[in-house]
Every structure is written in C-alpha cells, then in structure tokens.
Amino acid sequence: MPVNADGLPEAAAPPPGLVVVGRYDQLQGYGVDRPRGADSWLFTWTTGGHGRLRQGAAETRAGAGDLVVLAPGVRHEYGVEPGARSWQFWWVHCQARPAWSPWLRPYDTGDGLFVVTPTPATLHDRVGAAFRRMLADARWTGTDAPPATAPDDRVAVAHGTAARELALSSLEEIVLLTAATARLPSPPPGTDPRVRHAEALIAADPGAPHTVRSLAESVSLSPSRFAHLFTRQSGQSPMRALREARLRHAARLLESTDLPVDRVAAASGFVSPFHFSRVFHTRYGAPPGAYRTGGSMVET
C-alpha cells in the first residue's frame, strides 16, 4: 500500500544535515507520499523495473539507467509504476552541492523535478560502482581505511564529516557522469548557438578573465550586439551569468578544499577578496568562512 510519510516517522525523509544512501527492490503497490516534500534533496538511480515519480505538477517514469532528482520543499510522491511488477533503485537523501546546479538545470522538467536520461549503457556499471562505494564510505569512522565493501544491509547513514564528504564525492561523480552524457533536451526554438557557445565557455572555466569583449570575440560579434543577444535569450547579462558561475565555483572550492578564502576568491575570478566575501554573502546567506563550516544546499 502507498505510504504517507507524514503519518509514518520511519518513512519520513532524514534531517538535512545527513547523507543517507540505500538500495531498494520494491514490488507492485509500494509508494511514498510526502505532502510537505522533504528538507533534503532526493536522488534516485533505477537499475531495474519501473518507477513513477511526481514533484508538484511534474511527473516522470523511471527505467534502468535514469537518474531522477527531487529538490526539497515541494510535495512529492514516488513508487512502483502502476502495471509494473517491481522497481529496483538506489536512493540518496542529502544536501546537494552548489556546483551541481548548472549540471542539473538543463534537465529541470518543472517544480524541481530533474530527469537526467538516458545515460549510456556503457556507464551503468561505473555509476553502480559509485553507489556501492557510497554505501561503504558512509560507514567510515575517519580512522583506518574506509571499508572496501558494504555489509549486507542496504541503508547507511553518514554521520561523520569525513564519511559525509566521501559519500558526496561519489554522488558528485554520479551527477557529473550522467548529466554530461545524457541527451540534453532540445534547446528552445530560436536559441542562438552563439549564446550557447558563450555559456559553455563560462561554465568550462568561470575563473578565467572573461569580459564581454572577449566572449563577443569568441563568437564573432560586437560587444554591444553580443550583450544584447545574450541578455535577451538567457534572461541575464553576460557579466551576471559570469558572476553566478564564479560564485558556484567558489562554493564548490569552499566545500571540497582547505584553500584560504583569498585563494578561493582568486581561483574563482574575483580580484578583491573583500568584494568576493560581500557578493558571496549576498548570494548564499553567509560569508565564505561560515559557509564552509555550516554546510550548503544547491539553489536552482
């Protein structure tokens, strides 16, 4: 029977500070309904059978090789697809890293439901191995070596900082592999390839000394014509897009390295550490140092 997670504590999503990973093999009739959504992100990777996931008004069917991601704060339901015998899938509840936002954004189908599909079959084994590594690493205590394999039980909670970061690193590999190789949705009619090329240059190296002039030259346009075209099609100016990319890059460095804040600023393309701290605080609600110690969440 379907489960209403508000009425059953054991089915409720975990607190946002934890990383919880598991593997399920569910039969027809299984389902979870969270009327208030979850405080954490939910990542699912289907290995067999079929599932159906709904987030707000958006809905999708999941088959083998599909990564489906549900953002927090929106009512969602998921379970074995009606008519299917079963659904085998990996799942992870966690706070997603800001660096994942641009990777997932092209697959947003509405209301924070991201459908990353299809992933080439040649990558399925590697993605599965990354999930198994997450299951083992989530149990690491920070002493000795992380376990080589996970025990027979199918759910693990990463309480410690080291275990949590190791688990998130494996999930980051999964998100990058699937988002980079899945077939992107067709761009909206009329999208100019020169704008897409400029966006790709920014995403590839946000810390580079890009300017409106240098980006315009890369697509053989005058700076004024390029800025007008970019703003009209993307909804933000080239420099605004560049600043957002640099802030996401900085957030990733703060999460995954011990670099001093001034070096994070320089590596992300900010000349002034003071200016970097100010705009970072405005964007993420905390100065860089506090953000590093206090955790994070992707904003889309």
Image: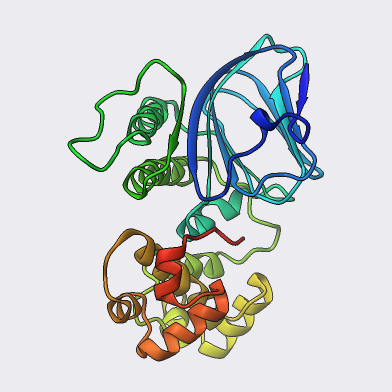
Say left or right for 64 vs 253.
Answer: right
Say left or right for 210 vs 149.
Answer: right
Residue 27's x, y, as percent? 66, 11
In the depicted structure, whether residue 220 falls above or below residue 119:
below
Say left or right for 5 vs 264.
Answer: right
* Nearer to me, 230 or 47: 47
In the depicted structure, whether residue 270 falls above or below residue 294:
below
* Nearer to me, 91 or 289: 289
Q: Tell me the residue at 71%/18% (across/down).
A: 30
Is residue 162 at all visible to an observer of this figure? yes
Q: Tell me the residue at 51%/87% (across/down).
A: 222
Residue 263's x, y, as percent? 27, 78
The outermost residue toward the top is: 85
Q: Quadrant of residue 121?
A: top left
* Nearer to me, 89 or 257: 257
Q: Tell me the residue at 44%/72% (across/down).
A: 290
Residue 126's x, y, as percent? 35, 30
Say left or right for 95 vs 164.
Answer: right
Residue 95's x, y, as percent? 52, 51
* Nearer to me, 35 or 221: 35
Is residue 201 at all visible to an observer of this figure? no
How is the protein colored in the picture? rainbow
Q: Quadrant of the C terminus?
A: bottom right
